Image (tube, coloured by chain):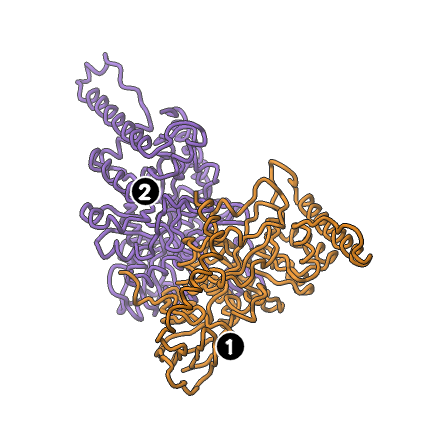
């Protein structure tokens, strides 16, 4: 039922978007000023600066300026944030919100790189709102780990009237899952999973070669038949896209690193529970990690909890995730908070919730830090962002007020 | 209904285990000998849970029991003195519902939806993963890291009446000595656990009405069983010798305890429908009810308060205690973090528990180790700070019927004390040391907290 409804809505989305756009064009310009000045808060930019008594100026949904003692433009709506903490809208690098659970895994096949999460996204999904209200303004939401390759994730904002505009990347990383052995069909062992992936990359190379030959031959005769799955893997091999790998065991991580050595794709390790055991191997290959902790859910061992600190020391770009529904999106910032508990400096932990996650998702030009020219995705809190008692007061997405706690139903 | 025999076997097995563990309890005396008989934890901010915070106070433990708490205590000359200045001192935390120490396969005896005769203590393994195993005293290191000194362990929620739970400590010389109360409650579920379990087996119950009718029928059977024994016992001895006594049934014996209010029934119920159902049964049969989970209990807060029915809430960050990877939206329509605050405000007794689902594999769920951090979330959602702490100390002790020994720093109670290096509700605060019965059983290492057998890694 839910699946059918979401498909329908998605099919209608462009039509709805066009209708809204027309409606908007006919209404007179809104009287509200398009310039907003957030003044007086402590601004953690996630770009290397903490600005006490800072000012953030938002113009037309973008950050026009940030600093201390900035002049407030005439006509700007001023929001007093004295005593508040200001951080960038957070980027959850691994989530499953936005789609019906039964749409996450195409259980009938082991390889489906051609599947795209964006085709399952439902603008009315109940997962968006709590994420946005908690300050998670962008998510990399993707297909599940039921298949060896389950397809392309999407990078989406969690708030905004025009769903099409919320999508930062329709295809944002190819998901593969190491160590997911299935009793009902091959691959049923770890080596078989790795062999299957090796075959997938080899086929993609052959596919690319067949097209190169056809093009080099002056495009004589019929072109090779198109294959959506192979096109996806080919984009990865051409570094136009990257691999997001579900992986827990150190042995599976090593198998994957050897595949990377062989085929040269860009890689981010996800969950990466035992990655701390092979940190030097990961750092040496400039592989990103989207890892533990998952707040208080998974990653109980003390060594695993210390992973963010270990990888920061090793110079690896490290980001956090909720894997929602494993951890609810609303607790995302506490994944970073737990890392502080285990030795990571506060500002580094914040990067793992913002700019590092944006970099790994290839959307750092738009989101992830409070810097001039970026989208005005901003979170205002009533205390240190990492403390459990601290609440989010306001969330801005593209300069629009997405959440105001004072208006919350009692 | 089946398994009278298995219950007996269980009891025999327990006896064997108890005897086996009792034998080396000479060790227990040795441990006691090495432990100073008087410990004075001095100079900290003491949160007794029984009154206001005391700055610069001393907690005195003598022979394993609290002998004094105050700012003007004279410290006996034979006391081993611990300096806690700048630190916080409070009772050991109590996890009011946990499966830590039980093999996941032992959590669902799904051959029968009604098995009141089962006792979880028969499956409790305090030498398994997360514990210090091998010879020597028992230490649930993974829980001690989080300051948890006692927990209720119960059978799972996969059937209607799953059996009897126990209150155990997380450190001690042997299983016998760490068992605080057994049985402590009868665990039941009227939620989606039993319907899911038996639907997959194509057996009844498939629906909530079937769950309720089976539960009602079992309680009626227990009433009849009780009457038949009362009738038999009321006969003069001369008549007794001629009559055949009723057949003993350990499961029915246990349910009779529930009907006589000697054992509370803990019923897992998350939706308003299920909570109402549990309350109707409690009214009809007259037993002491504790609600497990209670994700939507705030919608019933006034009714629960009027009847003083306690709610053992699931984790604030993850109230989906049924343990499914993807939460069942029918059982958890709209969890609200303000649940704990609203219930407290209405006067409903509450505890916050971990409902940790066993151990094993790479993907362990929340355990008691994170109880304090998880509960502290409630402080942002309307539960006063001191009530957050009581919801994981004094209140679970009261709900579990062990408040005469545990849950607060008061004279005569067990010397289960934790020392924290900062305010308890800050995410940066660590449990620095843990005392159980006055004995130092855990100390955070210089190289960070450590796992069992992995002390002081660089």
Q: Residues within 10 Å of mark 1 (few under 14, many from 20)?
A: many
**For the point 32% across and 59% down, which residue is it?**
B389
Q: Mark 2 points at which residue?
A: B269
Q: Chain B is drawn in which colour?
A: purple
Q: Where is residue A8 in the image (x, y as percent from the top left)?
A: 46, 48
* Front one among A110 and B270: A110
Give the residue at the far top of this rendering.
B242
The x, y position of residue A59, in whole percent, is 44, 77
Q: Is residue B354 placed above or below B158 in the rendered structure?
A: below
**The residue positioned farthest toward the front in the image shown:** A26
State the SS at label 2. Answer: strand
Distance CA(mark 1)–CA(mark 2)? 49 Å
Q: Name the residue under label 1.
A: A371
Name the image quarter holding the N terminus of chain B. top left
Does mark 2 fall on the same chain as mark 1? no
Q: Nearer the viewer, residue A234 or A131?
A: A234
The dot on residue B123 is none
Q: Mark 1 lies on which chain?
A: A
Q: How crowded is the residue under tag 2: few (<14 C-alpha within 10 Å), some, or many (20+)?
A: many
Q: Residue drawn at (54%, 57%), measured in percent from left and top?
A: A154
Q: Identify the colour of chain A in the image.
A: orange
Mark 1 or 2, closer to the camera: 1
Nearer to us in this view, B240 or B247: B247
Tell which subunit mark 2 falls on: B
Query: Height in image: A229 above or below B104?
Result: below
Q: Which residue is drawn at 64% across and 45% down?
A: A111
Locate residue B200 relative to residue B283 in the image: left or right. right
């Amino acid at each position: 039922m839910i699946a059918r409804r979401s498909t329908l809505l998605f099919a209608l989305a462009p039509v709805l978007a066009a209708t809204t756009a027309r409606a908007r064009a006919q209404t007179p310009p809104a009287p509200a000023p398009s310039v907003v000045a957030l003044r007086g808060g402590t601004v953690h930019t996630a770009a290397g600066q903490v600005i006490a008594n800072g000012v953030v100026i938002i113009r037309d949904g973008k950050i026009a300026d940030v600093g201390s003692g900035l002049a407030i433009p005439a006509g700007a709506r001023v929001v007093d944030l004295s005593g508040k903490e200001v951080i960038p809208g957070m980027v959850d690098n691994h989530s499953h919100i936005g789609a019906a659970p039964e749409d996450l895994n195409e259980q009938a096949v082991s390889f489906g790189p051609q599947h795209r999460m964006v085709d399952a996204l439902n603008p009315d999904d109940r997962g968006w709102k709590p994420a946005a209200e908690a300050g998670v303004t962008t998510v990399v939401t993707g297909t599940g780990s039921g298949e060896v390759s389950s397809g392309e994730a999407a990078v989406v904002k969690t708030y905004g009237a025009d769903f099409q505009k919320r999508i930062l990347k329709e295809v944002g990383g190819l998901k593969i899952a190491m160590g997911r052995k299935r009793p009902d069909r091959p691959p049923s062992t770890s080596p078989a999973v790795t062999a299957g992936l090796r075959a997938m990359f080899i086929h993609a190379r052959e596919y690319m070669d067949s097209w190169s030959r056809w093009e080099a031959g002056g495009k004589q005769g019929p072109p090779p038949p198109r294959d959506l799955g192979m096109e996806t893997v080919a984009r990865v091999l051409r570094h136009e896209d990257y691999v997001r790998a579900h992986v827990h065991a150190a042995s599976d991580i090593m198998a994957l690193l050897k595949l990377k050595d062989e085929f040269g794709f860009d890689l981010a390790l996800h969950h990466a529970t035992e990655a701390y055991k092979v940190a030097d191997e990961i750092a040496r290959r400039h592989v990103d990690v989207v890892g533990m902790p998952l707040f208080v859910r998974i990653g109980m061992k003390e060594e695993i909890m210390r992973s963010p600190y270990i990888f920061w020391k090793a110079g690896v770009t490290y980001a956090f995730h909720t894997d929602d529904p494993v951890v609810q999106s609303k607790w995302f910032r506490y994944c970073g908070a737990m890392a502080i508990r285990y030795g990571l400096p506060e500002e580094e932990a914040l990067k793992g919730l913002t700019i590092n996650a944006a970099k790994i998702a290839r959307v750092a030009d738009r989101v992830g830090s409070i810097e001039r020219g970026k989208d005005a995705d901003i979170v205002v809190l009533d205390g240190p962002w990492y403390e459990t008692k601290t609440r989010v007061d306001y969330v801005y997405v593209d300069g629009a007020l997405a959440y105001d706690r004072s208006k919350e139903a009692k | 209904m089946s398994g009278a025999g298995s219950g007996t076997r269980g009891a025999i097995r327990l006896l064997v285990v108890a005897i086996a563990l009792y034998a080396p309890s000479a060790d227990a005396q040795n441990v006691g000998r090495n432990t100073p008989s008087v410990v004075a934890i001095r100079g900290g901010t003491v949160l007794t849970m029984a009154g206001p915070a005391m700055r610069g106070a001393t907690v005195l433990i003598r022979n394993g029991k609290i002998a004094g708490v105050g700012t003007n205590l004279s410290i006996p000359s034979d006391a081993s003195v611990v300096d806690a200045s700048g630190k916080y001192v409070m009772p050991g935390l109590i996890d009011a519902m946990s499966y830590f120490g039980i093999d996941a396969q032992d959590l669902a005896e799904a051959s029968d939806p009604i098995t009141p005769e089962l006792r979880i203590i028969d499956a409790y393994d305090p030498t398994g993963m997360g514990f210090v195993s091998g010879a020597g005293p028992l230490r649930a290191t993974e829980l001690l890291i989080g300051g948890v000194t006692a927990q209720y362990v119960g059978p799972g929620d996969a059937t209607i009446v799953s059996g009897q739970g126990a209150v155990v400590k997380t450190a001690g010389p042997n299983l016998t000595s760490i068992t605080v109360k057994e049985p402590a409650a009868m665990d039941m579920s009227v939620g989606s656990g039993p319907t899911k379990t038996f639907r997959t087996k194509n057996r009844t119950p498939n629906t909530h009405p079937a769950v309720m009718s089976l539960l009602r029928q079992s309680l009626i059977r227990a009433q009849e069983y009780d009457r038949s024994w009362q009738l038999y016992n009321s006969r003069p001895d001369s008549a007794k010798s001629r009559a055949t006594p009723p057949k003993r049934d350990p499961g029915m014996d246990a349910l009779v305890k529930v009907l006589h209010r000697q054992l509370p029934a803990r019923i897992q119920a998350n939706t308003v429908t299920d909570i109402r159902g549990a309350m109707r049964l409690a009214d009809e049969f007259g037993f002491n009810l504790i609600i497990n989970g209670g994700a939507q209990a705030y919608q019933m807060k006034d009714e629960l308060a009027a009847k003083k029915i306690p709610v053992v809430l699931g984790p604030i960050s993850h109230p989906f205690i049924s343990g499914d990877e993807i939460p069942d939206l029918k059982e958890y329509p709209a969890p609200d973090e303000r649940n704990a605050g609203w219930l407290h405000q209405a006067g409903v007794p509450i505890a916050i528990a971990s409902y940790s689902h066993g151990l094993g594999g790479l993907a362990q769920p929340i355990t008691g180790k994170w109880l304090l951090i998880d509960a502290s979330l409630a402080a942002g959602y309307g539960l006063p700070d001191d009530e957050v702490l009581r919801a994981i100390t004094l209140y679970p002790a009261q709900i579990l019927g062990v408040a005469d020994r545990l849950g607060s720093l008061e004279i005569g109670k067990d010397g289960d004390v934790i020392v924290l290096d900062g305010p308890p509700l800050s995410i940066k605060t660590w449990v620095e040391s843990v005392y159980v019965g006055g004995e130092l059983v855990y100390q955070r290492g210089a190289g960070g907290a450590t796992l069992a057998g992995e002390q002081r890694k660089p």
